[in-house]
Image (cartoon, rainbow, N blue to C red):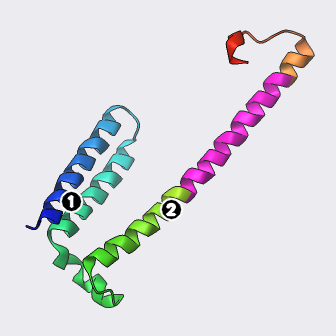
Amino acid sequence: MIPLQIISLIFGLYMLYWSFLSYKKRLFYFNELMFWISVWTLFMTVAILPETVKFILQTFQINRVMDLLMILAFMVLSIVTFRNYSENRQLRKKVYEFIKNDAIKQSTSGKKSSQNPRLR
């Protein structure tokens, strides 16, 4: 095994462990845990046995496994970035509506909020 394969294997094992810890902390559902276990297992398999993806390389006329991994990484990063942006916008909209409704409620009742005055 070359050093890059060893580093990739260690990284994959660490990410498996981190995924499991996230599940234990109830940040992931079981289905999400299974998805991430599949992703990191596939990653380690391709890192250790790059010849397992030769048929994909030949089909799409890609020269090296590293090129395929980089293409896939950019695709995944694009998806994650778009999803993160969309969820951020959705959360921002919910916070705006909550603050707006709270302000309307306070103005109609004439009472001040029971929040900490330092946070205003």
Quarter of the image that includes the C terminus: top right
Residue 94 within the magenta-colored segment of the rendering: yes
Mark 1 or mark 2, whichever is nearer to me:
1
Q: Position of residue 52 (x, y in %)?
A: 19, 76
- The stretch in magenta equals 82-103
Give the residue type at disc 1: Ser
Kindly identify the residue that appears in the image at 33 percent across and 47 percent down. Answer: 33
Whole-percent x, y for residue 35 in the image: 35, 54
Q: Is residue 2 left or right of residue 74?
A: left
Looking at the image, residue 43 lies above or below residue 62: above
Helix, strand or loop: magenta stretch = helix
Q: Residues within 10 Å of mark 2 (few under 14, many from 20)?
A: few
Could you tell me how far apart the alpha carbons at marks 1 and 2 are, in whole angstroms? Answer: 22 Å
**Which residue appears at 68% of the width and 41% of the height?**
92
* x, y percent for residue 41: 23, 58
Can residue 115 be seen by looking at this rendering? no
Tell me: residue 70, above or below residue 36: below
Task: Single out the residue that lies furthest toward the left.
Answer: 1
Q: Which mark is residue 79?
A: 2
Q: Is residue 57 left or right of residue 73?
A: left
The image quadrant that residue 12 belongs to is bottom left
Mark 1–mark 2 CB contact (< 8 Å):
no
Q: Where 52 sits versus 30, above or below? A: below
Q: Which residue is mark 1?
A: 8
Query: Could you tell me how many numbered marks the image carries?
Result: 2
Please name the amino acid that badge 2 sits on.
Ile
Give the camera-side residue of 88 and 30: 88
